[in-house]
């Protein structure tokens, strides 16, 4: 297991900001995740899991605990039976979509452009273009903070819009089992290509961001509310409301985590004043943002 001290989280998040984690651990395989948890417990430190770091904002002061990376070391895909696959939590969704296309398995095309890993996607029931992880997820293997492994059915996760019970506790996703329909590989690849083209056309992929900054308010679109509030292109420091898609806050260069947090709060306040709608961040805030 790789152990690093005072590791800058700016190197491990798609926002490209964030101060140091006290310890940053990279298990070599799933069997070492228990060892990583023991490392944190022995030192009486909090811990958290990161995958691709695509939905996280670490504060400039960092994280006074242990960050455990579940990434490409824990990213095996196994065909369990016809149409049913088991995928390690560290596999990137784009890689999974490509592997499924090659196998002629359809129904995951919506996730090909989501910048995250299987573990994070299951935890937040990630989705795009009318699809959600919950549509194809059957069960997950998780680990408790004490190192106990257990299997939970998808119906036990209380999946809803960008939510599951996995966000409420400390259970760690090790892998997920999914079920898909058979399809033509070329048609599946073409659909992925089409959706990725739409994403490039509409989203600010040329700047670091954490994807959609806010959850979709019921009956509204966050980007439209932000645009109607006159905030397109509005900046605080190096953070900016994207002028390509107002639902994204981007790091236009040299942003700090405090810049991004301040802009998130400013957007929430102005949208509340102009529309009466309370925006809820989709991005998870880690560390101290009170200064």
Image (cartoon, rainbow, N blue to C red):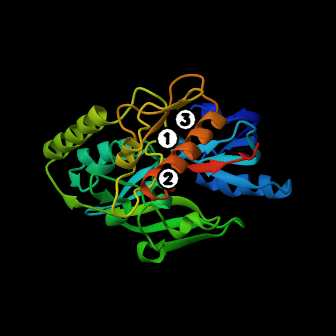
Residue 89 or 207: which is nearer the viewer? 207
Q: Name the residue under label 1.
A: 210
Where is residue 155 shown, x and y percent of the image?
Answer: 42, 76
Please determine whether, in this image, residue 245 is positioned above or below residue 105: above
Do residues under tags 3 and 2 come within 8 Å of each other at their CB atoms? no
Q: Name the residue under label 2.
A: 273
Please tell me which residue is depicted at 49% across the width and 54% down the height of the picture.
272
Where is residue 108 shown, x and y percent of the image?
Answer: 29, 53
Q: Name the residue under label 3.
A: 15
Q: Judging from the image, what secondary structure is the residue with disc 2 in?
A: helix
Please determine whether, in this image, residue 254 is positioned above or below residue 68: above
Residue 29 or 269: which is nearer the viewer? 269
Do residues under tags 3 and 1 come within 8 Å of each other at their CB atoms? yes
Name the front one of labels 3 and 2: 2
Residue 195 or 108: which is nearer the viewer? 195
Describe residue 80's horizontal placement relative to residue 76 as left or right: left
Tag 1 or tag 3, which sits nearer the N-term? 3
């Amino acid at each position: 297991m790789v152990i690093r001290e005072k590791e800058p989280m700016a190197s491990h998040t798609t926002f490209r900001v964030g101060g140091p984690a006290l310890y940053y651990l990279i298990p070599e395989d799933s069997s070492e995740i228990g060892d990583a948890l023991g490392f944190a417990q022995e030192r009486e430190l909090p811990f958290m899991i990161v995958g691709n770091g695509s939905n996280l904002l670490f504060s400039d002061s960092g994280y006074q605990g242990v960050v455990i990376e579940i990434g490409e070391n824990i990213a095996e895909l196994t065909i369990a039976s016809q149409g049913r696959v088991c995928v390690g939590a560290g596999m990137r969704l784009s890689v999974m979509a490509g592997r499924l296309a090659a196998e002629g398995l359809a129904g995951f095309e919506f996730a090909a452009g989501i910048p995250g890993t299987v573990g994070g996607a299951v935890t937040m029931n990630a989705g795009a273009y009318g699809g959600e992880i919950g549509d194809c997820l059957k069960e997950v293997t998780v680990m408790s903070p004490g190192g106990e492994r257990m299997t939970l059915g998808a119906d036990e996760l209380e999946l809803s819009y960008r939510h599951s019970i996995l966000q409420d506790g400390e259970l760690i996703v090790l892998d997920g089992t999914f079920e898909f329909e058979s399809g033509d590989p070329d048609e599946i690849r073409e659909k992925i290509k089409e959706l990725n083209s739409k994403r490039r056309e509409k989203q600010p992929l040329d700047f670091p961001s954490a994807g959609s900054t806010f959850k979709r308010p019921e009956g509204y679109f966050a980007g439209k509310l932000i645009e109607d509030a006159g905030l397109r292109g509005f900046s605080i420091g190096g953070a900016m409301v994207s002028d390509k898609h107002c639902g994204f806050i981007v790091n236009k260069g040299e942003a700090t985590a405090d810049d991004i947090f301040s802009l998130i709060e400013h957007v929430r306040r102005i949208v509340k004043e102009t529309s009466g709608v309370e925006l809820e961040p989709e991005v998870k805030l880690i560390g101290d943002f009170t200064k």
